[in-house]
Image: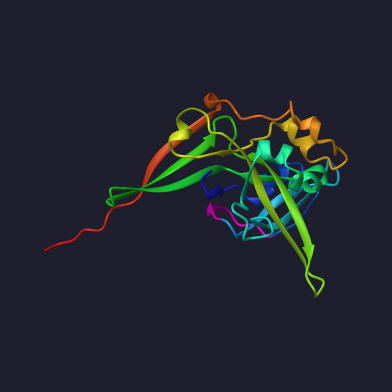
Amino acid sequence: MNESFALTAGLEEIRDHFEINKVIAVHEPRSRIEPTEDVPIIVGRKRERMLVESRWGLFPFWAKDSVHADLSGVLSKPIFDRIVKKQRCVVPGTALTRRMQDDGKVKRQALLTVKDRALFGMAGIYEERIDPRGGLHRSFTIVTTAPAGEAGAYFSGVPLFLEPETREAWLDPSLRDKTLWQNRLGPIGADRLKLVLETTEPAPLFFH
């Protein structure tokens, strides 16, 4: 999957869309969020739902890929058992982004959005640890699936986009049986995605 996404929605829009009860994260709209940056994520069931700050990239940071986790691996690998059972989160976003360069001349950006949603929720899992001084550190990874349709030409994977009803179940920490997710989760249809290619900046001009 690409390693950046956008979250251009404001705090109030995020709060209303995901029915958040408590905000303990700092948020400013951003057109590009990259790994290791702090991101607001959503945790908790209804009436207990919070928007909290988390670092993009699970501990340990030296892992082969700490920013994405394939859905099949999340459901089958023992290493994910503990956190997928009770430390699931939703990552808000407005677009996936990938920067490209054509023959070293023109820089372009691929934007992938969900057609019927200006703001969407991506499935994630998170980890927490306490440092020697007692400080809480939270990190997360985005759960991904194979890309569908033309998105596959630009993205090696796409997030697991959650429908509202599935999102509620995903955020309920009392649902700890991993087999519940086997038939409830899957990739979004290609007809629901919109791909846009845009020029980000012109190539520099050289005169002799």
Q: Position of residue 137 (x, y in %)?
A: 74, 63
Above or below — where is 78 with respect to 130? above
Specify the quadrant of the image occupied by residue 124: top right
Coloration mode:
rainbow
Q: In this view, does 157 lie to the left or right of 41?
A: left
Numbered marks: total: 0
Q: In this view, does 7 lie to the left or right of 47?
A: left
Image quadrant holding the C terminus, namely bottom left
97 part of magenta stretch: no
Q: In this view, which residue lies farthest toward the front? A: 78
Q: In this view, which residue lies farthest toward the right? A: 174
Q: In this view, which residue lies farthest toward the bottom? A: 133
Nearer-the-camera pick, 16 or 175 = 175
Q: In this view, does 107 lie to the left or right of 27?
A: left
Q: Where is residue 53 in the image (x, y as percent from the top left)?
A: 71, 58
Q: Where is residue 107 in the image (x, y as percent from the top left)?
A: 34, 50
Q: Residue at x 14, y 62 (%)?
A: 207
Q: Residue at x 48, y 27 (%)?
A: 149
Nearer-the-camera pick, 200 or 186 = 186
Above or below — where is 173 with respect to 53? above
Above or below — where is 134 with respect to 109? below
Nearer-the-camera pick, 163 or 177 = 177
Specify the quadrant of the image occupied by residue 55: bottom right
Magenta residues (range):
26-34
Specify the quadrant of the image occupied by residue 168: top right
Q: Position of residue 36 (x, y in %)?
A: 60, 60
Q: Residue at x 50, y 38 (%)?
A: 112
